[in-house]
Image: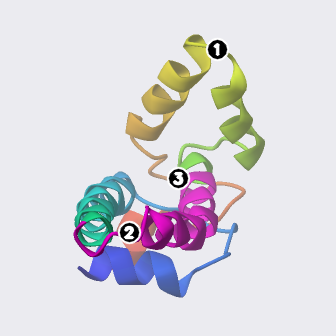
Amino acid sequence: MHYYTDVLKKYADFSGRARRQEFWMFCLFNIGVAIIVAIIDAVIGANMIIYGLYILAIIVPSIALAVRRLHDIGKSGWWYFITFVPVIGGIWLLVLFATEGQPQPNEYGPNPKAVHA
């Protein structure tokens, strides 16, 4: 749960670094919340309005987290746009997200793993 709230506390913070664990735990929890919101939306017959509002609310922190994840491996946040390259772009971005972060400090800040240890 704290992975989710920690990301929301940094709502639009595109600076710094994010560990793999923080990124993937947020993704996992976010999928769970989205499913629950979609079910509630369907049960009350809101025609996906609540779900749509949830997706709109979570898009900025999700992109900010993705940029911080890219910073952890020493890549610019602009690499996020590789996803617009059909087929290959999304796969390459997934590989980047799964890559282990740089153990030493880089231009985006200190290793978050060392900071939290």
Residue 106 placed where, x, y %? 64, 54
Q: Residue at x 25, y 72 (%)?
A: 40
* Residue marked by disc 1: 86
Amino acid of disc 1: Pro
**Position of 33 relative to 67 (above/below):** below
Instruction: Name the amino acid type tagged 2.
Output: Ala
| Residue drawn at (59%, 67%) of the image | 56
What residue would you read off at disc 3?
69
The reply to whether residue 21 is visible in this rendering is: yes
Pointer 2 residue? 114
Name which quarter of the figure residue 6 lies in. bottom left
Viewed as shown, does residue 30 lie left or right of 91? Answer: left
| CA distance for labels 3 and 2 | 15 Å
- Locate residue 78, reporting x and y percent: 77, 42
Which is nearer the N-term, disc 3 or disc 1?
3
Q: Is residue 20 left or right of residue 63?
A: left
Frontmost residue, 105 versus 22: 22
Question: Which of the two marks, 2 or 1, is nearer to us in this view?
Answer: 1
Q: How is the image coloured?
A: rainbow
- Work out whether 21 lies above or below 10: above
Of labels 2 and 1, earlier in sequence is: 1
Tell me, yes or no, whether the highlighted magenta stretch contains residue 57. Answer: yes
Task: Give the CA separation, mark 2 to mark 1.
Answer: 36 Å
Q: Which residues are magenta?
A: 43-68
Q: Residues within 10 Å of mark 3 (few under 14, many from 20)?
A: many
Q: CA distance from mark 3 to mark 1?
A: 22 Å
Tell me which corner region of the image, top left, top right, bottom left or bottom right, holds residue 50. Answer: bottom left
Sequence-wise first label, 3 or 2:
3
Q: Is residue 111 left or right of residue 77?
A: left
